[in-house]
Amino acid sequence: MKFNRVWLVWLVAVLLLISFIPVRIAVTFRQAPTPQAIFVLGGDFARTRFAGKFWLSRRDLDIWVSDFPQYLDEHQRILRKFGVLPSQLHLDGAATDTVTNFTSLVDDFVADNLHHVYLITSDYHMRRARVIASVVFGSRGVVVSPVAVASSRDEDESLVRVVRDFGRCWLWVVTGRSGAGLNPRLD
């Protein structure tokens, strides 16, 4: 009998943990129905050029770019050509992969009272980016409106990568660590 009670308590705790993010996302969409900033995932300068064009019809929004530090100057150069002011441009070089693109900036978004952002990335990358955003951003009350950049790739990223990063996101929610150190390419 004691085992059943422990199992039930554990099950309820897991269900509460899993359900709090969808509830938080729904509340946030209601409170912030319009995007308040543009968030660009690095990895392809075509995304940055697209973001610059996209920004031209939304000049009141700041642009946030997350990429490796060595590429930030090029992102800045591209966006400045579109007229983005330095005060509207936020460049983050802390990320080492797609999950850390989100984990490195979510607290900055919350601190700046940004609860709804346009998410700009390539079409093949969007499924994984949305899964990561749902968990990482959703856990902090930030939602995304996805804007896909057309690419020449025919297929979305593999489901294995999506599931792997979904697990890493939950690891981050529970422990504050993304598991990025497990990536052998970072050595």
Image (cartoon, grey):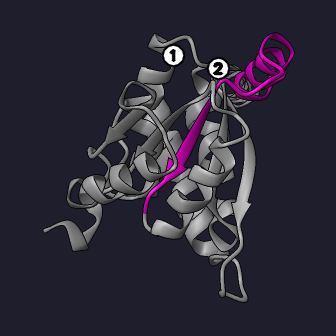
Magenta span:
20-42
Relative horizontal placement of residue 5, taking residue 161 as reference (left or right): right
Q: Label 1 sits on what residue type?
A: Val
Q: Is residue 141 above or below residue 88?
A: above
- State whether residue 131 appears in this view: no
Local packing at callout 2 (Cα closer than 10 Å; few below 14, some 14-19, many 20+) is many
| Quadrant position of the C terminus in the picture | bottom left
Q: Label 1: which residue?
A: 110
Residue 8 location (% of width, % of height) = 73, 24
* Circles 2 and 1 in contact, beta carbons < 8 Å: yes
Query: Disc 2 to disc 1, how far (Cα)?
Result: 7 Å
Q: Label 2 sits on what residue type?
A: His
Label annotation for residue 115: 2
Q: How many marks?
A: 2
| Quadrant position of the N terminus in the picture | top right
Relative horizontal placement of residue 139, taking residue 172 as reference (left or right): right
Quadrant in the picture for residue 11: top right
